[in-house]
Image: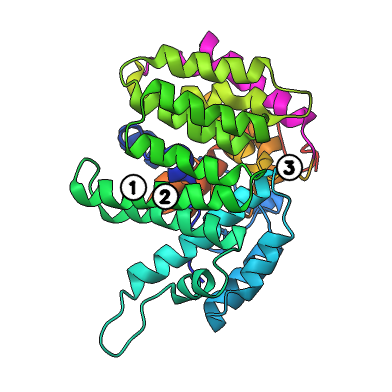
Amino acid sequence: MEILWVLIAAAMIGFVLVPFMRRRRGMIEQVSPGHPDAADPANYGFVLQEELDIRMPGPDQDLLDVLDLVQRTQDYRAAAQLLAGTEAEGERRWQRVQAFAGAAALELQQRPGGVSEAPGGQWLRVWRTEQPKDAGGAAVQAEFLVQQAWRTATPGTDEFRIIMEEAKAACGQAALLAPGDPVPYIVELSVARGLAYSRAEFEQLWLKILDRAPAHMGAHLAALHYWCEKWHGSRQLAYEFAEAAAARAPRGSLLAAMPLFAVFEHLPEVTLVAGFWQSEVVTKAVHGALYAVGAARPDDPMLAHVRHLLVFFLVRGERWAEAMDQLVHVDGHVGALPWTLSADPAAEFAVFRALAVAGYEANGGSPATLPH
């Protein structure tokens, strides 16, 4: 089974950090996991690099089991059943819709079909044909089209626009089948970005999401991407959106971490001076994310996303003990930002993990002093 959660990362944030990743390559190579100055992460019970799961940010065994079954048998019914039993307003339904759409998209890419071979992802087409009124299948189809547009066509071309228009129509159909479900409208946020919705059009769409799921973290991340891309050159609008979301976040909501994602989104645009990682804007955003993580439910599906991004910022800020605390919670799964921006997410994660361990031990830490 090959469903990489880079698709989720792309839908939420986009490939915005690649230039920055290249710029810091020299620093990473100086203290790699095999370097004599680096401590051994295995001493802390961390998973070997080759065993890191790059598909997901955290565990969702039900999803993995169903994905495996669907792709092995090409029978959609287990997927339909899983989505039907997943809470509409929650984060997990959105993640599962993305996963099923991504699986179908990757299958189609690997097996485009031909005279004697059915195309990959045939199970999704059968699902839509046999159960055209199924809300889950309609949402997956809409997300599938969005992913196809971004993966196979060039933005601004007629081909891209045609696929996006088809995705927009699919979002509307999915919304009609499940009036209280925010997912079709969250999918449309990517359409809004692709078709360059006006500010008024976008805000009308955004109000529909707020009416259904006002604290939906995945929706806010997708909306943040729109603000950053649509109003290019104005970081202020993106920061204002993120800070407003954090300010109105109810206790226990991960929306308090939104400013950290806004900082992350604009990393290529800032001046990477020596003290940047300890600057006020980064420190404030990190503290907000740490607060959000501390107050969140342990089973919040978005918790791992925030923890992974915290690892990145805490290591760069040389806050070794705090980075180690986040690593204890997320180690084993690396399908999240920023690792999925790399061609080898496991290697990127392993480098930062090794840096965290080395820094932690250089400041007196050890496996015995790390709380689990």
Callout 3: SS: loop
- Which numbered marker is on residue 300? 3
Query: Which residue is tagged 1?
Result: 165
Query: Which residue is tagged 2?
Result: 169
Image coords of residue 54 (percent x, y): 52, 57
Q: Is residue 13 left or right of residue 152?
A: right
Image coords of residue 270 (percent x, y): 36, 17
Q: Outermost residue, bottom direction?
A: 116
Q: Outermost residue, left direction?
A: 157
In front of the other: 275 or 362: 275
Residue ID at (67%, 49%): 92
Residue ID at (57%, 70%): 131
Callout 1: SS: helix
Residue ID at (50%, 31%): 205
Badge 3: few (under 14), some or many (20 or more) residues near its Cα, within 10 Å?
A: some
Span colored in magenta: 272-297
| Amino acid at circle 3 | Asp
How far apart marks 2 and 1 lie (CA) works out to: 6 Å
How far apart marks 1 and 3 lie (CA) works out to: 33 Å
| Amino acid at circle 2 | Ala
In front of the other: 73 or 85: 85
How far apart marks 3 and 2 lie (CA) works out to: 31 Å
| Amino acid at circle 1 | Glu
Residue ID at (76%, 23%): 250
Badge 1: few (under 14), some or many (20 or more) residues near its Cα, within 10 Å?
A: some
Residue 45 painted magenta: no
